[in-house]
Image: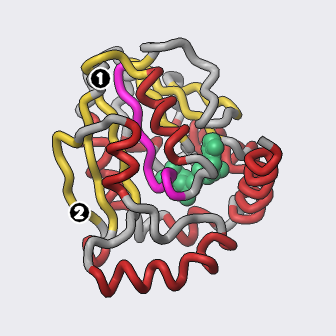
Amino acid sequence: MVDAALEKRQVKRAYALYSPIYDFIFDRIFHPGRVAAVKLLDIQPDERILEVGIGTGLNLPLYPRHCRLTGIDLSDKMLEKAQAKIEELGLDNVTLKVMDASALDFADNEFDRAVATYVISAVPDPLGVLREMRRVVKPGGAIVILNHFRSQSRVVGALEDLVSPLCTRLGWKSNLALEPLLREVGLTPELITKVNVFNGWRLLRCGNRK
Ligand SMILES: C[S@@+](CC[C@H](N)C(=O)[O-])C[C@H]1O[C@@H](n2cnc3c(N)ncnc32)[C@H](O)[C@@H]1O
C-alpha cells in the first residue's frame, strides 16, 4: 500500500517534468499507432468513451466529435496540456479528470469503450488498470490497448530485460509481458496488430465479456 503510493508520487513527479517536452518527443514517432488505435475503437454516435492516461491529449484531434469522451490521468501537469488542446480545437464533448486508473471513480458499465495508448507499461499497477477498464466498460464493449510489450523474440526479449532497470527509472517497463497480463485479467484479444517503427508496438482490441 505504502509502496504503491510512493510509485504514484514518482509517476506524478516524472510526468510533471516530461509534460513541457512530451509532445515534442512523442507526437510524430507514435502518431501512426494513435490513428490506428482510435480507428480500431470503431466509435458509434453518442457513445461514451474513456481514455485512460490521456496525458497531453495527443489523441484528441483523432476522435469523432459525436462521441462523449472522458480522459483521466494521474498527472495534473499532463492534463493542463490536454486542456489547452481542448480549447485550441474548440472541443465541447470532452471532460478531463485527475484520477488514478487503478481506482477509477466511475460506476460499473459506465462506458461503451475504453482505450489506453502508451500507458499500460507506464503505470505502477498494469493489472489493476486493466481490471478497472473491464469494470467500467459495458459487457460487449471494446477495450483497445496500444503499448510496447516484451518481445516474443528471445534475443530482443533478453535485451529488453537487460535495459529494464534503466527504463524503470525513466518511468516505464520495457519488458512487460502481454500474454500473462491478459490471462490474469481475463481478456482475449479479437485482433492484434503491430504498429509504429520496426512494428515494435502492439495494438489490440478485446471484447469485454463479463
Ligand atoms: C507515456 S504517457 C502516455 C500519454 C498518452 N496516453 C499518449 O498516448 O501520449 C503515460 C501517461 O500515463 C499516466 N499515468 C501513469 N500512471 C497512471 C495511473 N495510475 N493513473 C492514471 N494515469 C497514469 C501518466 O501520467 C502519463 O500521462
From this view, report whether residue 37 is shown above or below residue 87.
below
Pinpoint residue 88: horizontal percent, then vertical percent. 58, 41
In magenta stretch: residue 166: no
Residue at image coords 29%, 81%: 154
- Identity of the residue furthest to the left in this view: 190
Question: Residue type at mark 1?
Answer: Gly
The magenta span reads 112-121
Pinpoint residue 83: horizontal percent, then vertical percent. 65, 39
Q: Along the horizontal axis of the image, is 55 left or right of 190?
A: right
Residue at image coords 34%, 45%: 182
Q: Along the horizontal axis of the image, is 122 left or right of 180?
A: right
In the depicted view, which residue is nearer to us: 105 or 117?
A: 105
Residue assigned mark 1: 141
Q: Label 2: how many residues lie within 10 Å, few (<14), some (14-19) or many (20+)?
A: some
From this view, report whether residue 71 is shown above or below residue 15.
above
Q: Are marks 1 and 2 in contact (CB under 8 Å)?
A: no
Badge 2 element: strand
Residue at image coords 54%, 12%: 107
Pinpoint residue 48: horizontal percent, then vertical percent. 41, 19
In the depicted view, which residue is nearer to us: 35 or 156?
A: 156
Pinpoint residue 189: horizontal percent, then vertical percent. 22, 42
Residue at image coords 27%, 23%: 209
Q: Along the horizontal axis of the image, is 97 left or right of 68?
A: right
From this view, report whether residue 91 is shown above or below residue 159.
above
Residue assigned mark 2: 194
Mark found first going from the N terminus, 1 or 2: 1
In magenta stretch: residue 115: yes
Q: What secondary structure prevails in the magenta region?
A: strand
Q: Is residue 82 visible?
A: no
